[in-house]
Image: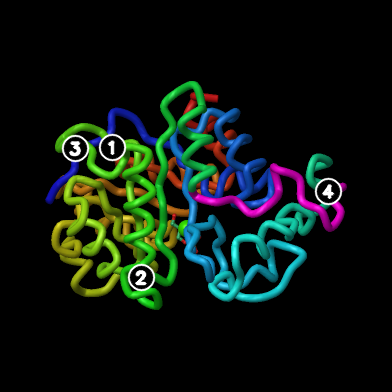
Amino acid sequence: MTHAPQQRIQVVAHRGASEDAPEHTLAAYKKAIEDGADALECDVRLTADGHLVCVHDRRVNRTSNGRGAVSALELADLAALDFGSWKDPEEGPDWASSSSTPSADTSVLTLERLLELVADAGRPVELAIETKHPTRWAGQVEERLLHLLKRFGLDAPAPDEPSPVRVMSFSARSLARVREASPTLPTVYLMQFVSPRHREGRLPKGVGIAGPSMRIVRNHPAYVEKLVRAGHGVHVWTVNEPEDVDLCVRLGVDAIITNRPAAVLRRLDRG
Ligand code: G3P
Ligand code: CA
């Protein structure tokens, strides 16, 4: 499967504008929309009571004032935690003063709330949703995800039309599950390393978009060129340095996933 090339490089805010605001919070996504990001990246996990929440790590320890695995906590437990105060107080007064009580902008973010934010953005903003640890849940993450997307009318984009949502994963199996249920939803295969199979420019069956790390792009630019020539979309993560942005532009990638959307847009003369 190939993918129509983008007219211009898409700037995707990784976990929101996560350099400026605490990652995966409403504050970070609002900032990314204000900054002019074309799309928002988020990781999703299932809570013990079956809600999809935007959290990167398996545990909440690093990014909140609580402890424990997301999968062992219910949404109500997570809602009592502050996902903002871990960020350096010098960096952002809005969240730095948070006590143990989270504000609406720093409490746990459900995927549903993020979809509402995007729907109300006032301009087109795409969403790149990454399924985390999907094998552990034997299809439940994908099932819940597609159910939620259906409620927002986003699960079955018209073929050959740009889709406002795409699903990303390091797990080819997770992407296959998504395509089985929703064949027109674009999928992105994330790669941390280049295996011999990848080197030939092949992606898992049915996947149209490659998601190589910036490290792959720096170390194997010829491989990235091969993907581009083959007509695959190429979405690179995490691109924060100006020289890396320039390399992505030279190689003709489609999307740059960054913690610094405002700086990348400036580098692309769009800021
Ligand atoms: O956008 C892909 C990238 O987010 C994958 O790595 O660990 O930041 O989820 P990670
Ligand atoms: Ca991610």
Residue at mark 2 to residue at mark 4: CA–CA distance: 37 Å
The residue at which mark 3 appears reads as 4
Element on which disc 3 rests: loop
Q: Which residue in the rendered view is the most extreme toward the top?
A: 122
Residue at mark 1 to residue at mark 3: CA–CA distance: 12 Å
**Residue at horizontal 57%, vertical 68%?**
57
Nearest to viewer (mark 1 / mark 2): 1
Disc 2 packing (10 Å; few <14; some 14–19; many ≥20): few
Q: Determine whether label 1 and label 2 are within 8 Å by CB.
A: no
User: Residue 125: horizontal and vertical position, in percent?
Assistant: 44, 32
The residue at which mark 1 appears reads as 163
Q: Earlier in the sequence, mark 1 or mark 3?
A: 3
Disc 3 packing (10 Å; few <14; some 14–19; many ≥20): few
**Residue at horizontal 63%, vertical 48%?**
25
Q: Which mark is residue 126?
A: none
The residue at which mark 2 appears reads as 193
Of 84 and 14, nearer the camera is 84
Nearest to viewer (mark 2 / mark 4): 4
Residue at mark 3 to residue at mark 2: CA–CA distance: 25 Å
Q: Which mark is residue 96?
A: 4
The magenta span reads 97-111
User: Residue 220: horizontal and vertical position, in percent?
Assistant: 32, 61
Disc 1 packing (10 Å; few <14; some 14–19; many ≥20): some
